[in-house]
Amino acid sequence: MALGILIAAGIVGAIGIFIGLFLGIAGIKFKVEVDEREEAILGTLPGNNCGGCGYAGCSGLAAAIVAGEAPVNACPVGGEKVGNAIAEIMGVASEASEPMVAFVHCQGDCEKAKTDYEYTGAEDCRMLSFVPNGGPKRCNSGCLGYGTCVKVCPFDAIHVVNGVAVVDKEACKACGKCIAVCPKKLISLVPKKATVKVACSSTDKGPVAMKACDVACIGCGICVKNCPSEAIKVENFHAVIDYEKCTSCGTCIQKCPKKAIVQE
């Protein structure tokens, strides 16, 4: 009996040693070499893994930068400081980047926007695509106000105020998660330094837009005619600002009859 136990123990031990040696040899033989720069870049990145850079987390971005598939300043969260540090690791010149922030192109709050019916149901903007007219608000392009963007923001930079999502410019890191999740596609990234913005996404013709919201852009073109920098145009009954030309003079804000252009 004792001999049988010893033999069994010896066999188990031998198998364990064999497996250990096999795994050790396999680990050496199939070891994937990691570029030291990739590890250094990963240590420099903020580690939020937000995906705002377009890659699957910080490790994905670090690998892409080393492979030359992404610029050194691709991390929207780290900004210029992180971009400069990564440029030094890569031994390249630092690339200037324009700080961006998310902006909600809507100000149709509970007072300004008209509603067609009272909605009671799941408080998720994405679910409202299954209800009549895409939601209770008469404007098909307006913020639904149920905070799906708030729930996905990893930086607590967006909140619903009186039925409309509002971005905190200082807290926003331009990761783009709110943009991706908004079913109405009314959130976009704009230069942080920009102070003049079109706070409306409606593409309805003027008479329809006015019936839906008191502050809707009606595509009248008055802003276009009065802009001294030719920085604004109307596309599909909707004013659009070219931030490369805009000087933030505020003329369009003063001239807009519906107050659809704001300054912040």
Image (cartoon, rainbow, N blue to C red):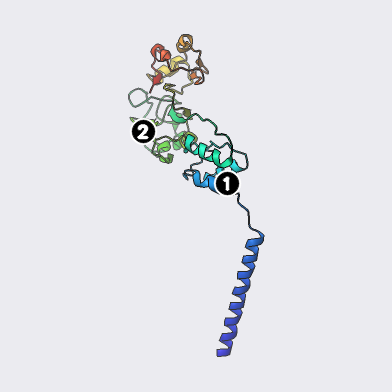
Q: Disc 2 to disc 1, how far (Cα)?
A: 42 Å
Tell me where residue 189 appears, x and y as whole percent.
48, 29
| Above or below, comparing residue 236 to residue 26 in the picture | above
Q: Which residue is mark 1?
A: 37
Q: What is the three-letter code of the residue carrying label 1?
A: Arg
| Above or below, comparing residue 87 to residue 33 in the picture | above
Dot 2: what SS? Answer: strand
- 147, 34: nearer the viewer: 34
Q: Which residue is mark 2?
A: 160
Image side of residue 88 versus residue 207, left or right: right
- 33, 127: nearer the viewer: 33
Tell me where residue 234 appears, x and y as whole percent.
51, 16
Assess disc 2: are there few (<14), some (14-19) or many (≥20) residues with their C-alpha within 10 Å of its C-alpha: some
Q: How many marks?
A: 2
Residue 52 seen by the camera: no
| Above or below, comparing residue 31 to residue 20 in the picture | above
Q: Work out which quarter of the rendered image holds the N terminus and state it.
A: bottom right
Q: What is the three-letter code of the residue carrying label 2?
A: Val
Assess disc 1: are there few (<14), some (14-19) or many (≥20) residues with their C-alpha within 10 Å of its C-alpha: some
